[in-house]
Image: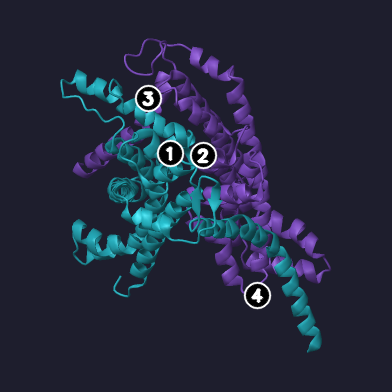
């Protein structure tokens, strides 16, 4: 009983700590006043309406979605192809190649972004959403590669061999055998990189100029200090992610 | 014989062709930019632009400037405190979820523990500034209870709280993953042999789960020391961390070579931490 009480108390305290900022954020996004600080003056949707009516924020949101989906599609493709190459067992220096492909995981985003910024500067390449996507592919390809490589096991390899013996071309093997067999891993890799790209700030900040992604737009909103509108953006992003997570959860439950 | 050789050669070429796009991408957009940074850190910014000076002056400036060294020290202190605090907070929670909680509630408990991940990273730090503001929620509560108010906004304490919040969530996941893998039989066997709860934890659970915990701690260290957003939003402008200093170079001062040199110092710190962890993991006594 003592043990149960101790566990329950600790859980309550920690969950309180974990939820505190998000709860405060959400509550004061409904603040009927100019400042998101106590006292709570009553329920108003005006800040949410203001966010949805803000063309810059909506544009940034669409930019973010575009960058996230495009860069993740590319990262999954690159990662999947490389994982297949390693899985064939025929790749010379497979260990070194795997290490090289996962190296970006160990370098901070700030350094990756700065390196790309300097290189683009020297090349005379102007900054855009495309350069942001390039950066996001760099950080997400290692992840997709690792997830796909872990998913291709002996079962997949023998099915591939069988298909090849029956005369399937390499492309058909990949498209009709390997990809369907590791579909859950491909999906997981894709969704994880969408999440990372969607929420990534520093690379997007360094590598964008006129069109920006949502985190960068929110960053510029922060300069106005404490503002219920920022709360509303945060709450709306929260809701969007919650819907996405529940959607994925329901979709995977149906598959079972 | 010659036929198998050519088939092998063909298979190799095919495997290389599959790996080539990812390798090329990593080379062009990761390795090369990194080289550019390393080279740039040896250059100088002058009034005319960048000059290929080939000098260690930027590093010398870092090593001799009290302000820069202070920023590095700030970063190191914040990161160490955050890593220790986060492990200390997350470990018991991960333990409760992995061991004490009935199995059917585990998924839910884990999902709840990372709910704040759903909002944007930038917004999470902002949310803490709401809580810690002078007239914010925390001081509202303290005032209601008749306790002295705390001025935490724009301070190192705020940075540490924001970071600890994020990494406690992250570490709960990673520590849970290593705790849940331990076979319960080990604990039962130890109990049968007369070990008390403290001994079981000290001699069975702690050492077996330690590698997973260390990997999580290293991850925390690496992510924390390289983060610009949290200290910038919560820490205010006085007590700079290293990433803030890097961003200052490219923003106000447009000194890309100095920014490059500072980034390489940052990377060196992470690499040292990694080497320390890897060596520690290899030690046979562990």
Residue drawn at x 38%, y 18% is A36
Chain letter of disc 3 in the image: A
Q: CA distance from mark 3 to mark 2?
A: 23 Å
The answer to whether B251 is drawn above or below residue A62 in the figure is below
Q: Which residue is mark 2?
A: A201
Label pair 1/3, CB-CB below 8 angstroms: no
| Mark 3: secondary structure | helix
Residue B220's place in the image compared with A90, above or below, is above
Q: Earlier in the sequence, mark 4 or mark 3?
A: 3
> Same chain for marks 2 and 1?
no
Residue tagged by mark 3?
A24
Residue B229 is tagged as 1
Characterize the local packing of mark 1: few (<14), some (14-19) or many (20 or more) Cα atoms within 10 angstroms: many
Answer with left or right where residue B43 lies relative to residue A37. Answer: right
Q: Which residue is mark 4?
A: A92
Instruction: Measure the C-alpha gap from mark 4 to mark 3.
Output: 55 Å
Instruction: Pinpoint the chain carrying mark 4.
Output: A
Q: Pointers 4 and 3 in contact (CB under 8 A)? A: no
Asked if disc 4 and disc 1 are in contact, CB closer than 8 Å, the reply is: no
Colour displayed for chain A in the image of the structure: purple
Q: Colour of chain B?
A: cyan
Residues flagged by tags 4 and 3 on a common chain: yes
- Label 2–label 1 contact, CB within 8 A: yes
């Amino acid at each position: 009983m003592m043990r149960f009480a101790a566990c329950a108390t600790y859980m309550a305290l920690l969950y309180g700590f974990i939820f505190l900022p998000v709860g405060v954020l959400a509550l004061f996004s409904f603040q009927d006043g100019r400042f998101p600080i106590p006292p709570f003056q009553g329920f108003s949707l005006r800040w949410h309406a203001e966010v949805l009516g803000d063309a810059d924020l909506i544009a940034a949101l669409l930019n973010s979605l575009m960058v996230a989906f495009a860069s993740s599609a590319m990262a999954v493709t690159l990662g999947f192809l490389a994982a297949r190459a390693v899985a064939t067992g025929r790749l010379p220096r497979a260990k070194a190649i795997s290490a090289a492909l996962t190296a970006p995981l160990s370098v901070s985003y700030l350094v990756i972004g700065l390196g790309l910024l300097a290189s683009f500067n020297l090349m005379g390449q102007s900054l855009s959403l495309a350069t942001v996507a390039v950066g996001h592919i760099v950080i997400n390809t290692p992840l997709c590669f690792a997830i796909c490589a872990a998913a291709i096991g002996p079962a997949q390899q023998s099915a591939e061999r069988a298909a090849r013996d029956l005369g399937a071309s390499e492309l058909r093997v990949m498209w009709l055998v390997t990809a369907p067999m590791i579909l859950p891993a491909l999906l997981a890799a894709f969704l994880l990189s969408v999440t990372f790209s969607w929420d990534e700030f520093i690379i997007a900040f360094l590598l964008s100029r006129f069109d920006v992604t949502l985190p960068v737009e929110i960053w510029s909103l922060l300069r106005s200090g404490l503002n219920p509108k920022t709360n509303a953006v945060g709450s709306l992003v929260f809701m969007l992610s919650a819907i996405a997570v529940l959607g994925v959860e329901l979709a995977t439950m149906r598959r079972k | 014989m010659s036929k198998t050789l050519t088939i092998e050669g063909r298979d190799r070429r095919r495997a290389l062709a599959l790996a080539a796009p990812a390798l090329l991408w990593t080379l062009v957009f990761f390795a090369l930019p990194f080289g550019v940074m390393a080279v740039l850190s040896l250059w100088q910014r002058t009034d005319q632009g960048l000059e290929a000076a080939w000098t260690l002056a930027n590093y010398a400036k870092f090593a001799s400037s009290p302000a820069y060294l202070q920023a590095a020290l700030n970063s190191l202190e914040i990161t160490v405190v955050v890593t220790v605090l986060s492990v200390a907070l997350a470990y018991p929670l991960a333990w409760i979820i992995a061991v004490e909680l009935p199995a059917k509630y585990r998924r839910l408990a884990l999902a709840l523990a990372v709910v704040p991940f759903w909002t944007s990273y930038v917004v999470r730090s902002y949310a803490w500034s709401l809580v810690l503001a002078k007239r914010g929620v925390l001081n509202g509560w303290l005032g209601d209870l008749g306790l002295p108010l705390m001025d935490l906004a724009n301070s190192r304490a705020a940075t540490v709280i924001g970071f600890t919040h994020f990494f406690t969530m992250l570490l709960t996941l990673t520590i849970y993953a290593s705790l849940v893998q331990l076979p319960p039989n080990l604990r039962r066997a130890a109990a049968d042999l007369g070990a008390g709860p403290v001994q079981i934890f000290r001699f069975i659970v702690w050492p077996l789960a330690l590698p997973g915990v260390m990997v999580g701690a290293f991850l925390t260290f690496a992510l924390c020391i390289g983060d610009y957003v949290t200290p910038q939003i919560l820490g205010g402008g006085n007590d700079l961390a290293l990433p803030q200093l890097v961003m200052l170079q490219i923003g106000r001062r447009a000194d890309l070579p100095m920014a490059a040199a500072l980034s390489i110092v940052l990377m060196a710190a992470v690499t040292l931490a990694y080497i320390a962890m890897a060596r520690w993991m290899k030690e046979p006594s562990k």
